[in-house]
Image (cartoon, rainbow, N blue to C red):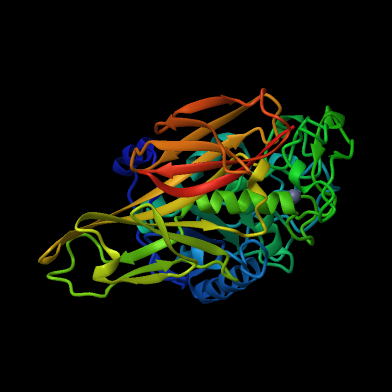
Amino acid sequence: MKHILPIVLFFSLQCIHAQVFEVETIKNFNGDEKRINLVILSEGYQASELEQFKTDAINFTNAMFNQSPFKEYANYFNVHIIKVPSNESGADHPGTATNVTEPASPIRNVDTYFNATYDSFGNHRLIYYEIDGFSANNTQAKIMNVLATNFPTYDQAMILVNSSEYGGSGGLFPMTYTGFWGPRVMIHELGHSLFNLKDEYYAGDILAAEAINMTQDDNPSTVKWKNWLGSNNVGIYQYTCVTGNCADWYKPHQNCIMESIEKPFCSVCKEGMVEKIHSLVSPIDSYTPISNSINNPTFPIDFQLDLIHPIPNTLESTWTLNTVEFATNVDAISLLDTDLNTGMNTLTVAVTDATVLLRVDNHESFHVSTVTWSIDNSSLGIDDITSETNDFSISLYPNPSNDVITIKVENTLNTDLKVDLISLEGKKIKTIIISNYETQNIDISYLSQGIYIANFYANNVLIAYKKVVKN
Ligand SMILES: [Zn+2]
């Protein structure tokens, strides 16, 4: 995965002297290019303590990938550490918190690289990289500079603070301490930073907003997690009211790590996380043959996918040769000369994830990745094989609907999609063509109640289908 650095950072690179530190990879699955790259920075570790930092980072990584849905999607992530030495150990504790009787722990002021501090914004357990907004901006630029110099293609960076006293923070660069709950604090904070999840305790009006796991909609027929209601203890729970407008907001669960760090992620949070992982990484790691890589191929010709398998594997694949289904749920096929027409042939494989962590029928979007080979077959043999990949994000909502459904398509190759809406008896009701980034509405108000199927075709190949419920 390539992380696009903001322009401001390139500017600041010219101004700030860049320091090079030792970078180590502690979790690697087949290179960084097609993975979500997590980077852990050390803070408050002296040079002599950097091996301990590595041990702490490995402990965190193990805890993270023991936790669903990181566990199932472990192959989608790599983890790297940047060993940034500090002059002194630990983090500052100025004793200025207003939510405890200070000093809640000994007052100290230590010289550390990112100046991590307890008592930020008056909260004893809030470790931040400076105590207030203004100087934090300077430290944030320093963190970005370290990343740009040492691991510019990071997707998410986080900071491990060498302190045994409970604390942490979310935001752009989440932080945690090294004590017992440290890994779980960081997993919670990653829920915010990487997946845009909200706290499922009430964190104040300023942080209240519509999100994957937070809403003001308490209607069971329209709430965004309606697919999960009644399963795995998902419901529509009013936030426990402590302050402000908390009574206006609802959460999906009462035992989610976004509320209490000793709990797992709830089903609604997991679904949002899996969707984000799909939006960042295609499950197709590589494939063969790539364009023009075969000279004078002889039959049978092998076509092979290297997929990034979830654990257990939930990927499904459909192979289509010249618009006819050829094979399903295999990573490789072979073609004989008798399989091919004379002239141009098209072989497409479409890969989707059928994980039960997603209940996408009512959900906004789903992802399909394809490889298409064009095989030029003359009477003298194969002249040429070319190939291309495409990643589709398709949205269909609301579902169920009683009047209009909206369909949106995004894909990397700018391909038009044809959508056929058909009845369960196979009768075609409507065909529309949607171009890339286009949104179209389909009127279904005149249809009788029941289940319909939307078939999605790219270049006349069926790449996905979705159930549509008319009510
Ligand atoms: Zn949750």
Classify residue 3 as left or right of residue 133: left
Residue 324 visible within the image: yes
Is 70 left, or right, of 79 in this rendering?
Answer: right
Residue 392 in which image quadrant: top left
Residue drawn at point x = 71 percent, y = 27 percent:
402
Q: Position of residue 334 (x, y in %)?
A: 33, 72
* Residue 448: x %, y % from top left: 71, 30
Q: In this view, does 351 lie above or below 240?
A: below
Closer to the camera in the image, 330 or 18: 330
Tell me: residue 30, above or below residue 235.
Answer: below
Q: Which residue lies furthest to the right in this view?
A: 241
Q: Residue furthest left?
A: 380
Q: Nearer the viewer, residue 368 or 2?
A: 368
Q: Which residue is drawn at 71% across and 55% down?
A: 167
Q: Residue at x 46, y 70 (%)?
A: 330
Residue at 61% across / 63% down in the picture?
70
Q: Where is the N terminus found, in terms of image quarters?
A: bottom left
- In the rendered view, does 28 fall on the left or right side of 168? left
Dividing the image into 4 quarters, which one contains the C terminus? top right
Q: In this view, does 252 lie above or below 358?
A: above
In depth, the one of 296 and 151 nearer the eye is 296
For residue 97, which quarter of the picture?
Answer: top right
Given residues 158 and 232, the one toward you in this image is 232
